[in-house]
Image: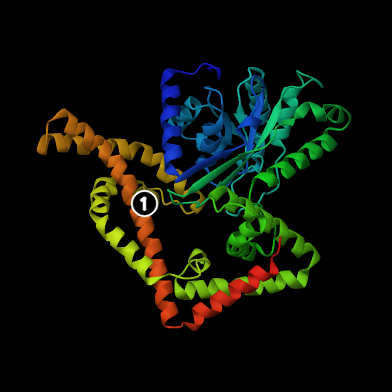
């Protein structure tokens, strides 16, 4: 078995290409806290787990080392020999769970030893402390595996500084769609040596202490809607109130600060749920009614955030979109097949049901479909249209550039027609729109940071 440090050129190039594609999959790639990543020491990256493969790639994209992060993954995906060969190539390590059979749990001892060996070479590993993926934006109970590995690797260093656990918070603008934002929030490293004295006295107590520490740190880096009974209302309220909270906190209206505002709202809602049950019940009713109004009007909250939609501005936006329509058509035609083939494979071949895997499937197939189709289309262009080298190069590059423009045009036209719907409902003095606006105001008034 090759060592993690034995990185073939093919893997190094693959990593660079995949990370390039990953960053371009999102409309905004935002990283905070790079200075918190330790150097020249054993590092365990501990991200929250909300979006399958994309969470691991988020960690790969911030790692300061050329060596790929060795990630633990559920053992059943290694059952296929071809898949296992590829997973081993990209430094994935199987971890065994109870559902894999109690007879296989003993194999984790070998896995933990392998992880400790990787860390002792000062190579990074990645472990999802929640163990499994969730559909909701909140932290779940942490498994013990990450801490067993951390303590086992730290034995070599005793109470001296050694292994560090780096909490990584991941926030997504959308679980499925490309072109949205990703925020990767890197927290300060947790020094495992601080818990070694307690571990020598009582491993269970020390494990609980470091687990609580990681949970608290990771909670600060994510949008943690920590409720068991009011999740949907929490989700709606954080969206409704974020613009108002931005103003309260005097923060600029930018993606990262909108995320910060949502964090503050989530913290406030958790406090209200604990201390003011009547108020949280009222908010639950208001948010449910508000969501119902949005559904009836086919509008999103962001449309109602804008107080007025002026006629002249709407006309100007419409003219600009119409003028840019040929660019959209060109980009759409050249990107239709590579964009939609991964979607069709996911729907009708793989038949993936869990939407938390959608973007991972789209991305995994897309990193192959786009270059393949771009090359094929370039060959056809050279054969049928022009064999001039500079025209061929320009055509090849234009496929990607105009594809991005087409995607942006499509997003803008959707927002434009949402504004038009809101504008027309306002002219008609829609009672449902008026009700939605009143409900929104009531929700905002009940949330003061």
**Up/down of 85 relative to 129, above or below:** above
Q: Position of residue 6 (x, y in %)?
A: 51, 16
Q: Position of residue 171 (x, y in %)?
A: 57, 47
| Relative vertical location of residue 173 with respect to residue 420 in this rendering, above or below | above
From the top left corner, tell me how far across and down residue 297 is, in percent: 46, 75
Nearest to the observer: residue 82 or residue 152: 152
Q: Is residue 215 visible?
A: yes
Nearer-the-camera pick, 339 or 422: 422
Q: Tell which residue pokes out farthest to the right in this image.
A: 201
Q: Which residue is mark 1?
A: 408
* Element at label 1: helix
In the picture, measured across the screen, residue 160 lies left or right of residue 166, that is right
Number of labels in the image equals 1
Q: Residue furthest front?
A: 312
State the colouring used for the structure image.
Answer: rainbow
Can residue 107 be seen at all in this image of the molecule? no
Quarter of the image for residue 186 reads: top right
- Horizontal side, residue 257 vs residue 106: left or right: left
Residue at position x 53%, y 22% from top? Answer: 67
Seen from the viewer's position, the closer of residues 293 and 97 is 293
Q: Quadrant of residue 266?
A: bottom right
Looking at the image, which residue is at 86% across and 31% down? Answer: 198
Report the front residue among 201 and 29. Answer: 29
Q: Residues within 10 Å of mark 1 (few under 14, many from 20)?
A: some
For the C terminus, the quadrant is bottom right
Q: Position of residue 367 (x, y in %)?
A: 37, 37
């Amino acid at each position: 078995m090759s060592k993690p440090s034995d990185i073939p050129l093919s893997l190094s190039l693959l990593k660079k290409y995949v990370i390039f594609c990953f960053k371009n999959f999102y409309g905004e790639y935002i990283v905070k806290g790079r200075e918190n990543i330790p150097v020249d020491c054993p590092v365990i990256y501990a991200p929250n787990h909300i979006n399958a493969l994309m969470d691991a790639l988020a960690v790969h994209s911030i790692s300061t080392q050329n060596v790929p992060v060795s990630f633990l993954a559920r053992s059943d995906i290694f059952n296929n020999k071809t898949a296992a060969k590829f997973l081993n190539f990209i430094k994935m390590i199987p971890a065994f769970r109870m559902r894999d059979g109690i007879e296989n749990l003993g194999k984790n001892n070998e896995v933990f030893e392998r992880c400790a060996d990787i860390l002792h070479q000062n190579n990074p590993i990645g472990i999802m402390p929640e163990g499994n993926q969730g559909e909701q934006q909140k932290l779940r109970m942490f498994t013990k595996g990450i801490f067993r590995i951390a303590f086992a690797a730290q034995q070599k260093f005793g109470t001296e500084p050694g292994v560090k656990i780096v909490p990584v918070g991941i926030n997504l603008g959308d679980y499925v769609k490309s072109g949205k934002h990703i925020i990767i929030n890197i927290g300060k490293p947790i020094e495992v040596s601080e818990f070694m004295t307690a571990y020598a006295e009582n491993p269970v107590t020390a494990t609980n202490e470091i687990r609580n520490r990681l949970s608290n740190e990771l909670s600060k880096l994510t949008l943690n809607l920590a409720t068991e009974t009011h999740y949907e209302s929490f989700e709606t309220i954080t969206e409704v109130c974020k613009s108002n909270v931005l103003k309260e906190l005097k923060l600029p209206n930018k993606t990262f600060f909108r995320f910060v505002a949502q964090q503050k709202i989530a913290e406030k809602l958790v406090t209200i749920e604990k201390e003011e049950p009547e108020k949280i019940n009222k908010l639950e009713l208001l948010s449910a009614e508000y969501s119902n109004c949005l559904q009836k009007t086919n509008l999103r909250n962001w449309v109602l955030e804008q107080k007025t939609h002026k006629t002249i501005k709407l006309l100007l936006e419409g003219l600009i979109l119409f003028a840019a329509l040929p660019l959209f058509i060109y980009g759409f035609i050249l990107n239709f097949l590579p964009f939609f083939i991964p979607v069709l494979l996911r729907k009708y071949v793989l038949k993936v049901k869990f939407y938390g895997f959608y973007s991972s499937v789209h991305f995994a197939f897309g990193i192959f479909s786009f270059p393949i189709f771009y090359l094929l289309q370039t060959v056809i262009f050279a054969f049928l249209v022009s064999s001039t080298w500079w025209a061929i190069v320009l055509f090849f590059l234009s496929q990607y550039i105009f594809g991005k423009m087409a995607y942006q045009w499509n997003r803008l036209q959707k927002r434009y027609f949402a504004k038009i719907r809101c504008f027309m409902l306002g002219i008609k003095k829609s009672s449902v729109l008026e009700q939605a606006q009143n409900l929104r105001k009531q929700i905002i008034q009940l949330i003061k940071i």
